[in-house]
Image (tube, rainbow, N blue to C red):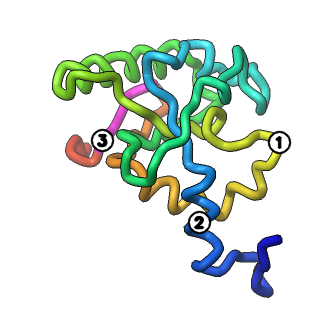
Amino acid sequence: ELSRNCLGQLSRAELLPLAEANFRAIRFDRLKREDLASALGSEGGGGLAARTQPCSLGACDAFLSHSWHDPEAPKWAALCSWARRFEAEEGRPPTLWLDRACIDQSRIADSLPCLPVFVAGCEAPLVQGVVGELIRPEERIH
């Protein structure tokens, strides 16, 4: 069993192995538009978690941050556009960290301390704005 300090936090010695053991990604070509729908509930749909794969820290292409309350159509369109560019440049579909897919939905609280490690374990953050627009660090808004 993991020990926690008085604030409920894991020690560094416990956090990294826990994050490494639970880090997963989903290839874009295994993702579906409806996977971004807010109406699916916390468990997702269509075996979403089963479509993920274990991933080494640093080997995931993007950490996808978005709002589950935004409509999925513009989110999906922007994500498809980004994924097409990525695949044209890299010759393979990108891998994504997506919370609903990559966190064990039956043990969400156990994964929360790992979130900073999960973010750092991805090559780049993708932040999806309200209208579905993807913002990458190299595309800062001026």
C-alpha span from label 1 to label 2: 20 Å
CA neighbours of label 1 inside 10 A, class few (<14), some (14 to 19), many (20+): few
- Residue that carries the numbered disc 1 in the rendered image: 106
* Magenta: main secondary structure: loop
Q: Position of residue 140 (x, y in %)?
A: 24, 46
- Is residue 98 shown above or below 33? below
* Residue furthest left in the image: 89
Does residue 62 show up magenta in the picture? Answer: no
Q: Nearer the viewer, residue 34 or 5?
A: 5
Question: Of the residues shown, which amino acid type is indicated by label 1?
Answer: Ser
Which mark is first along the chain, 2 or 1? 2
Residue 33 place in picture, x, y as percent: 55, 13
In terms of sequence position, does the residue under pointer 2 or pointer 3 come before the other?
Answer: 2
- State the SS at label 2: helix
Residue at mark 3 to residue at mark 1: CA–CA distance: 31 Å
Q: How many marks?
A: 3
